[in-house]
Image (cartoon, grey):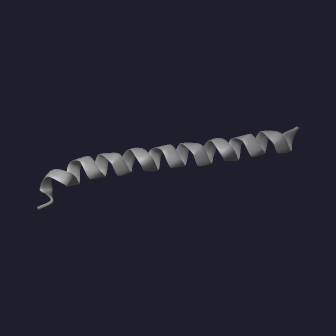
Amino acid sequence: MKKAFILVFLLLTVFVCFAVEETYTIRFNTVAAPTQP
């Protein structure tokens, strides 16, 4: 039972990290795009 909980927690952590990385990438591209020649 505990192993399943740890597995779900790890999957959630990976998913959250991926989502945050995607969000920051989109924001960075949005901010940097107008400054590009």
Q: Nearer the viewer, residue 19 or 1?
A: 19
Q: Residue at x 84, y 45 (%)?
A: 3
Q: Residue at x 67, y 45 (%)?
A: 11
Left or right position of 4 against 25: right
Residue ranking furthest to the bottom: 37
Residue ranking furthest to the front: 37
Q: Nearer the viewer, residue 5 or 27?
A: 27
Residue 8 in the image, given as x and y percentages of width and height: 73, 40
**Is the C terminus in the top left, top right, bottom left or bottom right quadrant?**
bottom left
Occupied quadrant, residue 7:
top right
Left or right position of 37 against 12: left
**Is the N terminus in the top left, top right, bottom left or bottom right quadrant?**
top right
Residue 28 in the image, given as x and y percentages of width and height: 29, 51
Q: Nearer the viewer, residue 22 or 1?
A: 22
Left or right position of 8 against 19: right
Residue ranking furthest to the right: 1
Residue ranking furthest to the left: 37
Residue 26 in the image, given as x and y percentages of width and height: 34, 47
Numbered-mark total: 0
